[in-house]
Amino acid sequence: MYADIIVDISYEKLDRIFQYRIPEHLREQLVVGSQVEIPFGMGNRVISGYIVGFSESTDYPEEKIKEITGISPGSRRIESDFIRLAAWMRSIYGGTMNQALKTVIPVKREMKGKEKKWILPLPQNEQILEGLGKKSPVKQKLLRLLREKEAISLEEAEAAYQISPAVVRQMKEKNMIQLVSEELYRNPAIYQKERQGKETILTPSQQEIADDFLKEYQSGRRNTSLLFGVTGSGKTEVYMKIIDGVIAQGRQAIVLIPEIALTYQTMRRFYEHFGERASIVNSKMSMGERSDQFARAERGEIDIMIGPRSALFTPFKRLGLIVIDEEHEGSYKSETVPKYHARETAQELARMKGAEVLLGSATPSVESFQKAVSGEYRLYELKERVKGRTLPAVEIVDLREELKQGNRTMFSRSLRGKMEQRLKKGEQMMLFLNRRGYGGFVSCRSCGEAMRCPHCDVGLTAHKDGTLHCHYCGYTIKLPEICPKCGSPYIGVFGTGTQRLEEAVKREFPQARLLRMDMDTTRTKDSYEKILSSFGRGEADILIGTQMIVKGHDFPGVTLVGIVAADMSLFASDYRSSERTFELLTQAAGRAGRGDTPGEVVIQTYNPEHYSIRMAAGQDYRGFYEEELMYRKLLKYPPCGKLMAVLITSKEENRAQGLAQELAELTQNLCGKDSMEMLGPTKAGISRMKDIYRFVIYYKEAERGNSIEEAKKRLEDYLELYKDRWDCMVQFDFNPMTGY
């Protein structure tokens, strides 16, 4: 017997199957998915690899076949379904099979579990006690305790009764007691047990959706569904009711959330309802905690796993449902190879497992909503907030007018006044800085005109050398000294941070109690929970933060949300910038007025007339969708077209640039007026990262064409044929979530 093995080296030249002989003593132990140690290369250095299949024959000479050394100590086996999923991911998203395999096993190694030792009496406890006579008073004490108690923990024996572990071990060796071990899980989801089993009461519209979904589910008609509900409409309650029905049929569920910051509130609500049958996994947990949660899932000890993107690869044997909450979020797209999207990957995993996918959002991605409108997805709608609560009143403040009135602070007069009122009333506020890690955009503070690429309709990004760049096609101009539209000299590169905003709040409102939530304040393991729970208990008046504070959080005490700089994502170098802005503003506005007191929202902007800002203020998703789709059709951007990014990287700039040019020339003849369009090659937005030079080519095509697929195959064949010629890495990314 031979094992087909993918070696644990993510290098294109080694991205193939290697065959190894299976030694007799391992034949019964090895299965598909086992991680093994193998001799590799001329020097036979021992490396690891993954078994992806078995065969009884080989095309290689028998004398050249090497033998498996052994099973990798502490390794976690990959389920065969996940191996098939990894192969699918590699074919769709590119990269190597090893990279795909490592993606589907987020916890690579079994961690040694914690143990609790228990001292138990033997049936002949009384005879043993009598046999001691007056000797060994400590041993007598333990045996008398075991007469009264069925079991005593080793810790209790030492702490409460001063019986040392050495005495216990001695008594075990002399067969005077039993000593058994209980495996303990490092479970991060420990809340008050008396709150388990809390009933979820649905509104009539929520109940109708849950009933219809479960009816379709029980019929076996599997499809992706989209739950489209306004902020505060109770989508989580619908998820839980549906999961109740899925669990009742003996199946299990995965609930994906976009941010670790959401874990605390989401897990608390699920734990109140499902108890210890629900668990979480995320990157802030220790490796031991994550390992334990996956072990619990594998053994069927939990029914629900909650977490960000990596939770999708939970090893459930009876997976029946995958919920993707806030499905529009860009964090569901991986930034490392393979650059998979959790939504598409969940759909493929559900197909393999006979499961269902349920998407949920108040601001669905344009791609998902188009499929729902066309009938490809089932569409469910929640049009009202629970308990008859109204959506917040939204005011748009034109910062151009504020400038004319001499106000150069970060707060408009309206926002400052409303903040003063809330502080007097003892109500809470959130200040949201609309920043997603983009570079600074350039805009006129007098008229609001932003500097945009004339070829790609995306914002130009300011560079330190005083130039503006388009990161799609390479268009470059010098930073203008005056506005080309109105002639004003007030041209500004916009970019600010939460620390600067916090300092401004302290100056304006020294009496306010502040909390800040951003990357700097959430580096430690439990920092998210500490900040959010503190704010939830009313220990701060104002919560300041970036997008992580406006996604799905439910704080009934918040009656005012201030969006300090709505334009900061609007003019990013990304064709999705209008969609991102609409989503963020709508989600931010949705945090206000979730309690009994109506909420207010102030949106500060230099572009009050922009459709994404107007529609967000009115919580008008359909209006935004129709206008955005029109622009996408005109420019052939997804979902009205296909987009593929090809990233070429190398330690040597001339090599990366040379290969990029060759690849562009190779596919030039596929481009045409009515077919595929090529943008670039050009330097990537970040042209050098960690001394690696980066060039990018974009391919854009109308929805029904197939030239992009042909271009990808032609490029892959060329790269395989000349893999020794170029010392470069090439990555393919379909429908990228951001510009490179």
Image (tube, rainbow, N blue to C red):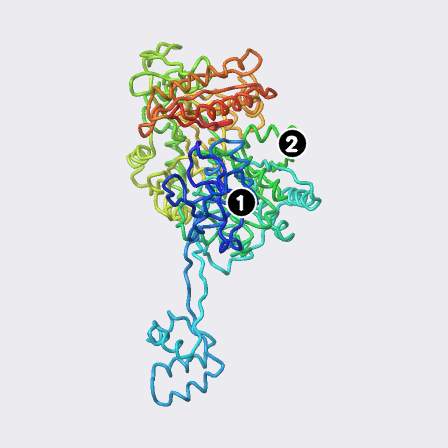
Give the residue at x 31% y 28%: 691
Q: Position of residue 299 (x, y in %)?
A: 53, 56
Where 84 sits versus 718, above or below?
below
* Residue 364, image quadrant: top right
Give the residue at x 44% y 32%: 12
Is tag 1's residue or tag 2's residue first in the polypeptide sequence?
Answer: 1
Amino acid under disc 1? Val
Where 339 sits versus 158, above or below?
above
Which labelled disc corresponds to residue 376?
2
Where 362 sits versus 180, above or below?
above
For the residues marked 1 and 2, what is the alpha-carbon distance in whole angstroms? 22 Å
Check the picture and name the quadrant holding the C terminus: top left
Q: Where is residue 668 in the image (x, y as percent from the top left)?
A: 50, 14
Under circle 1, the secondary element is strand
Q: What residue sits right under mark 1 in the picture?
A: 255
Residue 717 visible to the viewer: yes
Amino acid under disc 2? Glu
